[in-house]
Amino acid sequence: MRECEVLLVAGTHGNEVNAPWLFDQWQKDPGLINCHGLKLHSVIGNPVAREANRRYIDRDLNRSFQPELLVDQSLADLELNRAKELLDLHGPEGLRPCHVAIDLHSTTSAMGNCLVLYGRRPADLALAALVQGALGLPIYLHEADSAQTGFLVEQWPCGLVIEVGPVPQSVLQGRIVRQTRLALEACLVALANVRRRQGRYPRQLVVHRHLGSRDVPRDDSAQPQAFIHSCLQQQDWNILSIEDPLFETVSGAAHPERLDEGAAVVFVNEAAYAEKGIAFSLCCREVWPMQGTWIRALETLMVEDVQRGGPL
Amino acid sequence: MRECEVLLVAGTHGNEVNAPWLFDQWQKDPGLINCHGLKLHSVIGNPVAREANRRYIDRDLNRSFQPELLVDQSLADLELNRAKELLDLHGPEGLRPCHVAIDLHSTTSAMGNCLVLYGRRPADLALAALVQGALGLPIYLHEADSAQTGFLVEQWPCGLVIEVGPVPQSVLQGRIVRQTRLALEACLVALANVRRRQGRYPRQLVVHRHLGSRDVPRDDSAQPQAFIHSCLQQQDWNILSIEDPLFETVSGAAHPERLDEGAAVVFVNEAAYAEKGIAFSLCCREVWPMQGTWIRALETLMVEDVQRGGPL
């Protein structure tokens, strides 16, 4: 008899310490978070990196779930091995298969509590809509960016990231733990309701659709020539004017670079993105009417499985 | 002919990126910061760790300047070698000897712009008094703590740390760069004035004297059982009531631990101190009248040397 199984991942990045700590507390006190009858598997994404208090050891685990990397037998670094292991264990065809993956992250950017989706998969949109309907969290829809691929949740039929900030890497902070728990609990309530065909969907979904990313201006030796302008500090989700300066030099001069259009900024000053050449990302706020196809996609995953498994 | 030489160090911790970036800009534009006739040596403390974007490689460089470690020939890790190299180059008996060392740091704690002194060395107190008189920066006086020793500046006849926060590790931020520069410039003006016997000392020095540190409550396997209470968040330099809870559990309960007396907290949630077992430090605000011995100690270092070198 198969049950509907949900994979919960914390510590995919080893220096994002709040969600793994929440999992530790939950393990000690199983009543801390209500499972609502869902069969959950909680794992630490990158336990070796967590132990080392580093984002990753060999490569970013949350960029390692690219199909071409996963099938390449010549590659065997720590994170690729871990990606394969997680799929062998809990991938849709794994030993204890899961249909839904929820991956818990934190950020140094002032993003608040939010969801990140990768592409426009109908089941993801339905789950995000339920959580947004319950808590009002903003949604960052990452898509069409060939420079950033291979995210963990993309390998599961349905999945999203809970992203909470600002918090420095390696810092345990009550506000971040509380917000992570709140978003996680909202996901679990949503999935449990869908399983009972009682999902309460909003009429529409507000998404911030990824448009691209900007790096700081760099000199010939690739060193930053400027920093992010104070106009942008802690302005995540806000729409900038085309007049707003983006960068500022050490002498206090505004760098001439501007945005082409009025876009919102996200992930301003995420510490881990400097090495990826991202000072901040740009997105466009859109309101999408709720689609029946999204709802059916999520119900197919959550409810058919229950039917296979027998009566509720 | 010897001149009065001052050592300026940035990037003693490789993931504190703001001061090293300021040094890079200064190197490109030597007019960026006025040397006021001082002979300065600017170095990156731990260039290998900076390249790796980590605090350190083998051990914390800013705990490696312990006399017994520095003479131990059997130890040869990266940071101990670098400590010896810095002393060979710019130590008081080095190739290009310096009498004063200023070490630029950043912190994830909301410390603002401040100075850190190690012990009560008269010349350090005089320099700190000049900077406090000019800018009003708070001073954290670290002393009598056998668990934290071997700080870089202790190996120079006079030296202090400029500490600026809050900023996540690895994040370049305009506010931090500006405050670092401001404090550094105030140090240079102060030293140049002393050299001309024109130091303008305040009547008194306000110090926050180190009393000790507290770790989060831990379970039998040394894992944190609680996080720092929201009462303490961003309260650096403030005096707590003995009623204030210090820690909070995941269920929202205040942990029973309290302070014995009304002390001020500093370094609340410094990311790098978790591994040192420090959730925050405690200190006691004291007002000390300016001492002639402090002034003479600094003048002896700065002025006698000029006299050896010839007329100004």
Image: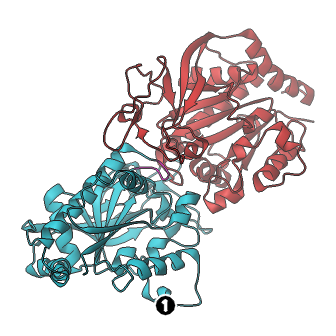
Chain colours: A cyan, B red
Q: Residue at x 70, y 34 (%)?
A: B36
Q: Quadrant of residue A297?
A: bottom left
Image location of residue B306, percent across then percent down: 86, 27
Q: Quadrant of residue B140?
A: top right
Image location of residue A288, percent across then percent down: 13, 72
In the rendered image, residue A148 lying in the magenta stretch gets the answer: no
Q: Which residue is mark 1?
A: A71
Where's the N terminus of chain A, which quadrant? Answer: bottom left
Q: Residue at x 30, y 57 (%)?
A: A243
Q: Quadrant of residue A202?
A: bottom left
Where's the C terminus of chain A, which quadrant? Answer: bottom left
Q: Residue at x 53, y 51 (%)?
A: B169
Counting every numbered tag in the picture gives 1
Tell me which segment is drawn in magenta: A167-171
- Answer yes or no: is residue A237 visible: no
Image location of residue A230, percent across then percent down: 40, 48
- Answer yes or no: is residue B169 visible: yes
Q: Main secondary structure of the magenta part?
A: loop
Query: What amino acid type is highlighted by mark number 1?
Result: Val
The answer to whether A86 is drawn above or below residue B91 in the figure is below
Q: Is residue A248 left or right of residue B162?
A: left
